[in-house]
Amino acid sequence: MRAFYIVRLLLLGIAATLIEGLAFSLDSDTKNRIQNTRNCKACRLMGEDLAGLDLTFVNFDGADLRKARLAGRDLSKTSWRGANLAGADLRGAKLLESNLSEANLQGALLQGAILVQAQLIETNASQADLRQADLRGAKLHGTLLKGALLEGVRLQTANFFETDLSETDLHQQDLRGITLTGCRLRGANLEGANLMKANLGRTDFQGANLERAQLNEANLDHANLSQVKLRDAQLRRASFMGAVLDRADARAADFRNSFAVGASFQGALLQNAIFIDAKLSQARFSNAKLEGSAWKGAQVCEADLDASYRQQGVCEEASFVTDVDDI
């Protein structure tokens, strides 16, 4: 995995060098159009260097800006809806409150870019370089970030919904309180990440690496955690209602005081895991490896546990509604 990212970085460096070698002269009509009308809809600016122009507030909707040179530029409150910015150089660019919805940013260089409160709704930013970028308050609904480089990116207060973050590297990132409801993080690297109090309901983590992650008090209701690596993860007081952890590796994970009613741990590796005082009614553990796990005070009503583990827990009357007729 690490070798893959090193190769990615080398290729991006080569791409940046090639972009810097491209310089095209912008015709006077286009310059006047940008400066006088602030409108460059559907402009063809592939590979152009827009140096010397005031680009704030300009409308670039539907424009072709593939491999354009925009590094370090102030692009605040610009609009790029449906624009093609594939491979564009936007390193260090200021895109404060800009609209990049439905734009193509595939493979774009956005390292250190400021995208505070920007709109990237249904934007394709797969394989983009967003290292150290500032995405605080940005809207990333339906955004494709698969394989994007996100080392050091600032995501606090960003708005995610059904965003694809598959195969991204977010290890050791501070993601406390983040909302990733319904997002896709298949195969993502979140090793050692801080996700305390994060809202991760219905998120798809299949095959992701969450080893040593901090997930205390996180909401993982109905999340897909099948085949994830959760070894030594902290999940105290986390909620897993209806979550699927089938074939997960959660050895020595701490589920203390968690709420996992109806969760599935079938075929999971749970050796030395801690379930003390956890709510595990109706949870499923068939074919799970449980050697050395701790269950003192755990509520295990209707959980399919072997008798030796059930005896360590307790079975109390459920206090939750299970049928509409009970309301």
Image (cartoon, rainbow, N blue to C red):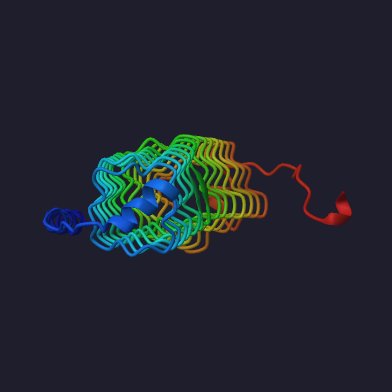
Q: Could you tell me which quadrant the N terminus lies in?
A: bottom left
Position of residue 34 relative to residue 258, above or below, is below
The location of residue 46, given as percent across then percent down, is 27, 63
The location of residue 157, given as percent across then percent down, is 49, 36
The location of residue 116, given as percent across then percent down, is 43, 38
Residue 263 visible within the image: yes
Q: Residue at x 51, y 37 (%)?
A: 256
Nearer the observer, 300 or 134: 134
Quarter of image, res 318: top right
Left or right side of 4 for 97: right
Number of numbered discs present?
Answer: 0
Residue 233 visible within the image: no
Quarter of image, res 72: top left
Nearer the observer, 181 or 191: 181
Left or right side of 308 for 189: left
Position of residue 91 relative to residue 305, above or below, is above
Nearer the observer, 198 or 88: 88
The location of residue 210, given as percent across then percent down, is 37, 48
Q: Residue at x 67, y 50 (%)?
A: 301
Q: Residue at x 30, y 44 (%)?
A: 53
Left or right side of 283 for 82: left
